[in-house]
Structure formats: C-alpha cells, structure tokens
Amino acid sequence: MPGTFGDSLKAIFNIPGIAPIFQNYNSSGFQSAMAIGLSRTAPNDKSPDIPNSQRGFLVMRGAGTRANQFYYDGLPLVYPFHADGITSVLNNNTIRSLEVYSGTYSARYGFATGGVIAVEGFKKKNDSVVLNLNTFLVDGYVFKNITKNLNVSVSGRKYYPNYILGRIPDLVPNQTFVSDYSDYQFRINWVIDNHNSLTVSSFGTKDYRHPFSTNKQYEPKKNTMETLNDSLIVDRNFRTDGIQYIWKPFEYVSNTMNISRSYFQERIQNSTYFTDTSKGVLSAAFNGLQKANTLGNDFSEDLRYFEDVMEFNLFKKILKLKAGGQYRETVSSFKGKVIYINENPEMLKITQFILSDPNTNAVMEGDRMVRRQLGYFSEMKLDYKGNVLSFGARRDYYDLSQEWKTSPRLMFAKEIDFTKTTFFGGTGKFFQAPPDVSYISKKIGNPNLKMEESQHSNIGIEQKFYLVILLNWKVTKIRLII
C-alpha cells in the first residue's frame, strides 16, 4: 500500500479520517505542569495549561488522540509506533491481518471513545527466516515449527543512525535530532489437543530521540551547550507479557482468555536558559544564553489486563452469541528531580523562583495513582445470505468516579457478494476513563473526573481490499473497515 514503506500497521494512516501525530511532547501533561523556561508554561504562570487531550499516536474521526485502543492478538498494545512516526513497533512479518474500527463496533471493545485497531499475528505458517539490512536499520524474523502442534517465532529490529552519522560528523548539522530505537516480538504457540491451545507472547521496545552532537575530539566547544528544546528529546521503553488460552469444548463453542501485563516508562527533562547580565551587556552578548537549570521527571505506568470471552455459533453460524468481560488495573506514578543547577548567583535566583511555583513543586514531590476499570458485554449477531444484524450492550465501571455506564450498540449490513461491497450502518455509545495520571493525580490533576462519553452513528459503504505481496512466498492480507 502506498506510503507504508512495507509497514503493514501504517496502512491505517491511509484511511480517510485518520491522521498521525508526531510526538514532540511526551504522552502526559507533565511538561506543561512544570513551570520552567521554554516550556509551554511561563515561570510566572500559577495555573499551567494542562490540556484535556495530550499527544497520542493518531486522531481518528475527530476523537481525542488518547481515545483509541490498540490490540495485538487480544493483548493491549500500549505503544504502537516509534517516536519518529516512521515505523510501528511490530515487525511486518509478524502481522497476519489487521482490522480498523472507526465507526460503531462490537460491544466487546470498550475503554475508548474513538476507534479500535486490532492486529492479528501468525499462529500457523511454514518455517521462514527473513533478514533485512540497510544503511540505518537491520531487522530479522524467524518462524520455526518445532512439532506439528508447537511453533516459535522471534523477531527484532535495530535502528542505528547515530552510529552511521558519527562517522561523518562534519556533514551533519549540530543539534539535529535523530532517533535510535529497537524492538522485539517473541511468541510460543502450542495446540495442546483438539480442544485446547495456548499462546505465550512478549513484545516491547526502547525508544530514544536526541540531538546529534559531533564527536568531541573534533570540535569539543560545540558540545558545551545542549539543545534548547528538551521537549523533543524522547527516552521511553515498554514491554508486554501475556498469555492467551483458547478452549473449544465443542465445534461451535469457544472460550478465549487473555491475561497480560504492560509496563511503560518515560524519562523527560526541561532546561531553562537565560542571559547573565550581572557582568555587563557586552559580556552577556559574548557569552550568550546560559543554562540555569535542568529539571526532569520519571514517569511509569503498569497495566494489568484480563479478558474472558465466550462465543456460541448456532444454526450453521447463522446466529452468533458472544458474551464476556474485561478488567483493567493501571498503576501510574511520577517523580520530579533536579538534574542540573547553575551555581551562578543570578541563575540560582531564577531556579529558586521556578521551584517556588506550586505546580512545579507538586511535580517534584511526585504522586502515585491506581485506577481500575471493569467492563462486561453481551451481543447477538444474525448473518443470513449477506444480511447482517448485530445488537448488544456493554456496562463499564470506573472506580475513581464510582460510575456505571451502559453502552448500547446496534449495527446492520447488506453485502453484495459479487462485488464484495457492503452497505452498513450503526449507532452506539462509548465511554472512556481519563487516560493519563496527569488528569487524575491529586497533586496536579483532578481525581474526581468522570468518564468521557461519545456517540457514534454512521452509515456508509465498506469495500474489502486484499493486498497480496509475493515476497519470499509470503502473503499478507490487510482488511480495512472504514
């Protein structure tokens, strides 16, 4: 697909109504809460601007950038794209198919007022080994069938422009921002017998984006000043470990259980620069800007997730009944720190003034919040000769606001088999709890915030596209649902 550069997950950016977000700022509101120079909040502002929607990964149909959910084989994918916005965190060879829901969708999916992107990986395929190598990146993928019912897949990627650019420092402008990231995916799939199967998965990434500095041995003086825009620096890592167990007691009955834990860490910093005029105007002009201080913040988020879904297919799959529920527990924390202080008396006054700001002081003290969400659903789907009718309901609970919300969902479709065209429509309600600790923190937010609500009503046409790529006998299918 054009514009994806061989990255299947990036196909979603070609769908009308979806726009990517380049992450200049981190995913929380801390940088606007810390009252320091050259940030979005001036030092003399006592009420820093903490927006309701922070930068996420994409905008879908006008919803907030943090209003969407990503899943990889039923497990939450909390960090789907690297900070450069060029590549996803999943190796392209691991993706079997993906589905994008941006209108009204199944009552199974909650915790989102925007859309849902569900990625499915390979559980069965022939043995394969793929290795890609170019100037700035190397990635590899291995799929091995140990036995008829047991297989293992491993993939990894390393993006290393800093190593290459370090060999040609004179050709790269100083302070040019470059990305340096790596990711991995690991899976074991075991079909125990005709009724039971087990999949163990682990995937994660490390992301860095920093200003390129020429080698100190060539021009040491150019490295005495760091970048003036620390908010562009990225230092993140995440990891998800999960288990999926599928039980099929009968041909038309199945139960899927997903258990996972996702851990995300981010380290940010902001520096304040001022001109020192204590020694006169000429001295200030000659020395230029001087760093007064650098303040940092360590942020972490630990997501524990459980899902159980039972499905019944009756009357030769004409009638499908589905019911289940999910539990999400998120432990978030942040803690500010002083990384650097200029001992110059004039600069110390500035630093003391900044640290006296109540919002900056609150971030420096730190906070830890635990929030829990519970959801359960049931739905029925009739599918007969291309005529589809699906209706269901979902109940969601958010512990901090102690709210129970009901989300009715209704969808219908008429498929023309010859052209693979479907006329469809639907309506439903969707709810989402505040997505970030900066919203609900007792120190810098409001723990009494209630769930966000959205109403999706749509009518349109679905056209199925099949993209077949013949590369080392590999076939990739991408299904886009608009």
Image (tube, rainbow, N blue to C red):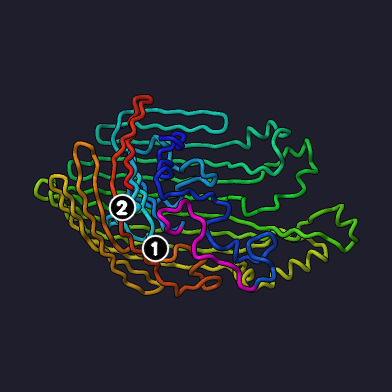
Residue 363 locus on image (x, y percent): 60, 67
Q: Say which mark, if any, is on residue 258.
A: 2
Marked residue nearer the N-terminal end (2 or 1): 2
Is residue 172 visible from the viewing direction of this image? Answer: yes
Q: Residue at x 64, y 62 (%)?
A: 337
- Badge 2 element: strand
Query: In the rendered structure, which amino acid carries the disc numbered 2?
Result: Asn
Assign the N terminus to one quadrant of the image. Answer: top left
Residue 259 placed where, x, y %? 33, 54
Stretch of the chain drawn in magenta: 46-64
Residue 355's disc is: none
Q: Does the magenta run of residues contain 61?
A: yes
Give the amino acid type for the residue marked by disc 1 in the picture.
Glu
Disc sitting over residue 329 in the figure:
1
Confirm whether residue 261 shows in the render. Answer: no
Q: Would you place residue 127 above or below residue 235 in this image?
A: above
Q: Residue at x 24, y 63 (%)?
A: 393
Q: Residue at x 40, y 54 (%)?
A: 61
Q: Give the camera-side residue of 470 and 356.
A: 470
